[in-house]
């Protein structure tokens, strides 16, 4: 960071976030970065940010150094910031000139982070990253002191920083934010929808369908945005309903025909009152395959059903597409109501139904997920 005060262009800012020492107003930052994908943002900007806290924001609950529910407090702070008017607040990107160089904070023209406050010392404090990668704040014996979470630091002391910490340089308040929390806060002030790879990132327990549907209804989401597939839990009342799948569905059936049949399944799904609570599991292509089972220790995706084995089945992806193999489960795996012999990999096509013991799912690609989003309220 240099002393150049000219505002960066959108192109240069998006590429490298070379903010001037005086920072940039939050509204401009959101305007430039609001549409940048999360993965691109995090890859290009590994350093944290310092965000000025407006005086109208009021006081924030203090964080203790060893709070068990610390993350919950940070989430509350982020929610309060999201609801506040941060338009003119200054934001600073803390990119060291070299790997472990300290960033000087103060009122002087030659510092890295220049704060517009008469009560701030010319060289007030330093922000630095130690050799373990952790960030710290060091007081430079400033006349009016440096505070972290409301407590004045001893003169010349160095203390660790974590995302969400509130710092005060004399009367100038700011929040230290890691790139992930910064991106989330940027997203809350942007019109852009959540990003596909963030919302559909695989989690062992899956996500509720109703949490995913609003994003899938965005017109900018197209079937080619993700190579992943999905396992959607079928609600109990749909399982008990008369099956709408034709007997002639087989491994030789063309994929277009499979889509037609699966569309009728989706129409049946949308009548279910519980479909919004159904679990959606993301299946990401992997050379080792994705294991499904009851135990988080043995499976990548957890199916909460007593009849499911700890490591029940595995979904594979190769040159010929998707396939599924039973791992010798106690209660078996059924593909279109037909048992799969243990150890035998069978082709798995979008729109097909899969039973893992009594846990019934639909195997869907993104195109069918988009169709589901359009038809389910």
Image (cartoon, helix red, strand yellow):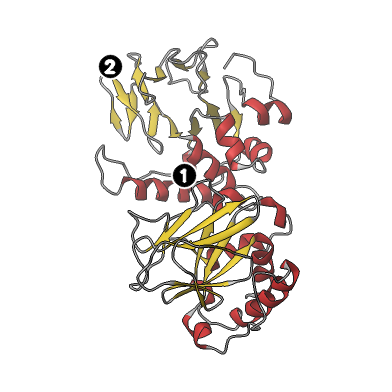
- Residue 189: x and y in percent read 60, 47
Q: Residues within 10 Å of mark 2 (few under 14, many from 20)?
A: some
Q: Which residue is mark 2?
A: 155
Quarter of the image with the N terminus in it: top right
Q: Which residue is mark 1?
A: 57
Name the residue: 36% across, 30% down: 161
Pick whichever, 165 or 306, lies toward us: 306
Q: Number of callouts in the render? A: 2
The reply to whether the C-beta atoms of the residues labelled 2 and 1 are less than 8 Å apart is no
Q: Is residue 89 visible?
A: no
Q: Quadrant of residue 138?
A: top left
Of marks 2 and 1, the one in the foreground: 2
In the image, is 274 to the left or to the right of 307? right
- Residue 43: x and y in percent read 56, 32
Give the answer, above or below, for where 133 lies relative to 181: above
Name the residue: 74% across, 59% down: 219
Name the residue: 68% across, 40% down: 31
In the image, is 127 to the left or to the right of 248? left
Tell me how far mark 2 sits from mark 1, CA to CA: 28 Å
Q: Is residue 94 visible?
A: yes
Pick whichever, 156 or 375, lies toward us: 375
SS of the residue under disc 1: helix
Quarter of the image with the C terminus in it: bottom right
Give the answer, above or below, for where 345 lies relative to 161: below
Query: In the rendered structure, which disc, 2 or 1, sits on the residue that comes first in sequence?
Result: 1
């Amino acid at each position: 960071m240099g002393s150049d005060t000219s505002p960066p262009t959108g192109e240069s800012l998006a590429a490298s976030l070379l903010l001037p020492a005086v920072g940039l107003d939050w509204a401009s930052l959101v305007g430039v970065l609001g549409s940048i994908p999360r993965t691109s943002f995090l890859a290009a900007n590994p350093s944290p940010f310092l965000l000025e806290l407006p005086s109208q924001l009021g006081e924030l609950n203090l964080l203790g150094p060893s709070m068990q529910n610390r993350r919950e407090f940070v989430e509350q702070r982020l929610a309060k910031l999201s609801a506040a008017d941060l338009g003119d607040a200054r934001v600073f990107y803390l990119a060291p000139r070299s790997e472990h160089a300290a960033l000087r904070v103060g009122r002087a023209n030659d510092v890295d982070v220049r704060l517009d406050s008469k009560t701030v010392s010319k060289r007030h404090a330093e922000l630095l990253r130690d050799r373990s990668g952790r960030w710290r704040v060091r007081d430079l014996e400033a006349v009016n002191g440096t505070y972290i979470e409301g407590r004045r630091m001893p003169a010349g002391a160095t203390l660790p920083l974590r995302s969400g910490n509130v710092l005060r340089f004399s009367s100038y308040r700011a929040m230290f934010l890691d790139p992930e929390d910064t991106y989330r806060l940027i997203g809350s002030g942007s019109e852009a929808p959540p990003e596909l790879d963030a919302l559909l990132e695989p989690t062992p327990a899956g996500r509720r369908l109703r949490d995913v549907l609003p994003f899938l209804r965005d017109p900018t989401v197209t079937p080619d945005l993700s190579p992943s597939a999905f396992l959607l839990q079928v609600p109990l009342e749909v399982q008990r309903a008369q099956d709408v799948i034709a007997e002639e569905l087989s491994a030789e059936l063309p994929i277009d025909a499979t889509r037609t049949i699966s569309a009728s399944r989706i129409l049946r799904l949308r009548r279910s009152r519980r479909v919004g609570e159904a679990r959606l599991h993301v299946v990401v292509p992997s050379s080792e395959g994705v294991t499904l089972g009851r135990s988080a220790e043995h499976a990548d995706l957890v199916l909460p059903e007593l009849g499911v084995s700890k490591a029940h089945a595995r979904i594979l992806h190769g040159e010929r597409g998707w396939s599924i193999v039973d791992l010798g489960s106690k209660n078996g795996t059924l593909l279109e109501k037909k048992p799969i012999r243990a150890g035998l990999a069978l082709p798995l096509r979008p729109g097909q139904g899969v039973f893992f013991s009594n846990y019934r799912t639909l195997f869907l690609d993104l195109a069918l997920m988009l169709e589901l989003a359009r038809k389910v309220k």
